[in-house]
């Protein structure tokens, strides 16, 4: 049975250590996973291309394949919380007619157009819009980045 499990992608962790991602300067995108998807999306997801090869990206009026570029706010470090983290603004798909059960955040600037996966998120239920705005709400980072959507901790 197909599934979406919220997680940071394992490949992303290794790629960070190899300096393959620059979250401040690369184009980071969010693509919607359609309602009725057939693939599995989890910590083993390595690329946005997995979504497209499974034909699992959302479609609909005014939704563009590849999703939307996200606004990544400055990288923050916290000596108190022993964390490095980023804050991502909410992503708004304007005037769309589509539905989605989850999303994938990926790096559209990686070498060879591999669109390396960063994280996968399950929405918990289907979200949709009909000729309106569909907003993917990102959590506020919280105190010392404890709730940041992407964080690295030294515990």
Image (cartoon, grey):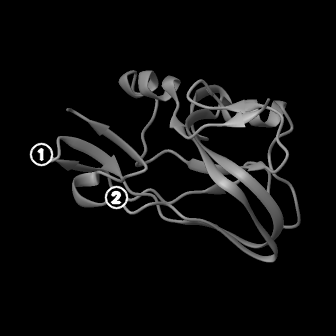
Q: Residue at x 77, y 32 (%)?
A: 2
Please report whichever mark, 2 or 1, sits nearer to the chain's N-terminal start.
Answer: 1
Looking at the image, can residue 97 be seen? yes
Residue linked to disc 2: 141
> Secondary structure under badge 2?
loop
Q: Quadrant of residue 1?
A: top right
Q: Residue at x 42, y 39 (%)?
A: 22
* Quarter containing the C terminus: top left
Say left or right for 146 vs 6. Answer: left
Foreground residue, 98 or 68? Answer: 98
Mark 1: give few (<14), some (14-19) or many (20+) Cα within 10 Å. few
Q: Position of residue 7 (x, y in %)?
A: 52, 37
Foreground residue, 130 or 29? Answer: 130
Say left or right for 127 vs 155. Answer: right
Looking at the image, can residue 63 be seen? no
Say left or right for 35 vs 82. Answer: right
Q: Position of residue 64 (x, y in %)?
A: 79, 57
Foreground residue, 114 or 43? Answer: 43
> Secondary structure under badge 1?
loop
Give the farthest residue toward the left. 80
Q: Residue at x 45, y 58 (%)?
A: 88
Q: Position of residue 90 (x, y in %)?
A: 53, 66
Residue linked to disc 1: 79
Tell me how far mark 2 sits from mark 1, CA to CA.
15 Å
């Amino acid at each position: 049975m197909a599934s979406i499990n919220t997680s940071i992608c394992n490949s992303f962790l290794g790629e960070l250590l190899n300096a393959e991602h620059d979250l401040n300067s690369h184009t980071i995108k969010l693509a919607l996973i359609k309602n009725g998807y057939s693939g599995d999306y989890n910590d083993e997801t390595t690329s946005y291309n997995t979504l497209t090869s499974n034909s699992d990206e959302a479609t609909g009026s005014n939704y563009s394949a590849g999703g939307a570029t996200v606004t990544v706010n400055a990288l923050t470090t916290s000596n108190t919380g022993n964390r490095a983290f980023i804050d991502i603004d909410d992503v708004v798909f304007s005037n769309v007619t589509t539905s989605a059960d989850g999303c994938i955040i990926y790096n559209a600037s990686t070498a060879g157009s591999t669109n390396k996966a960063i994280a996968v998120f399950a929405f918990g239920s289907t979200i949709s819009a009909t000729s309106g705005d569909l907003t993917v709400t990102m959590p506020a980072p919280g105190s010392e980045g404890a709730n940041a959507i992407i964080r690295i901790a030294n515990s």
